[in-house]
Image (cartoon, rainbow, N blue to C red):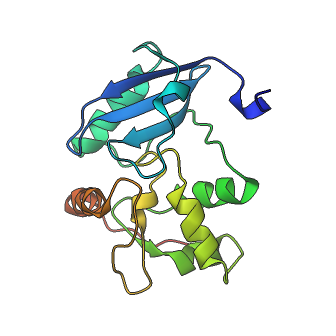
Amino acid sequence: MPSTTDLGHRTHTVTDSPIGPLTLVARDGVLIGLYMAEHRHRPEASGFGEASEAGFTAAVRQLAEYFAGERTEFDLPVAPQGTAFQRRVWAALRDIPYGETVSYGQLAAAIGHPTASRAVGLANGRNPLSIVIPCHRVVGSSGKLTGYGGGIERKRLLLDHEARRRQPTLGWG
């Protein structure tokens, strides 16, 4: 019997991007997944539902705007599926300013668990909405690029893309 988080009508579409094809998955019209080719924690395609472009217009447009340097935040209804801790980490990721990075330790402290940087890293790695929920903005404590579901090269490309277009802010956290 499926869990309540699995109920609902799923659809998916694939859109091109500068970092390769992106698979968008929605449940009842709400975005629940964005996966890159060779994505480390990509679910089986059989769970994506039927292929359909219907309902993905805003997500495809906002991704195109992001890659064109015209969008720094996403304004899409999302419903990432995960544990309460994972969802808390993913919510905090959305607060990291465009073009900036934070360490896993800083993110752990920001959610009130300063000693949980490893758990934060695991939750970050399970983020089902890459780019929209910007897990690529989290780096090692030394600033080194560490694991990314879409691969380190894609993480570097996303960070470089944002760095070229960012406006200075007053910081994070």
Q: Position of residue 143 (x, y in %)?
A: 36, 81
Please name whichever residue, 55 or 149, is drawn nearer the observer in this view of the structure. Answer: 149
In the image, farthest residue toward the bottom: 142
Q: Is residue 71 shown left or right of residue 49?
A: left
Viewport quadrant of the C terminus: bottom right
Camera sees residue 70: no
Q: Is residue 85 left or right of residue 173?
A: right
The one nearer the camera, 158 or 128, is 128
For the point 57% across and 65% down, the residue is: 122
What is the x, y in percent for residue 169? 39, 68
Where, by quadrant of the figure, is residue 166 drawn? bottom left
Residue 107 at what x, y percent from top left? 57, 72
Task: Locate residue 154, reporting x and y percent.
Answer: 27, 56
The answer to whether 46 is drawn above or below residue 76 in the figure is above
Q: Is residue 171 above or below residue 162?
A: below
Work out whether residue 42 can be spotted: yes
Residue drawn at (60%, 69%), measured in percent from left and top?
Answer: 120
Residue 171 quadrant: bottom left
Residue beneath the point at 75% across and 54% down: 84
Q: Is residue 169 above or below residue 27?
A: below
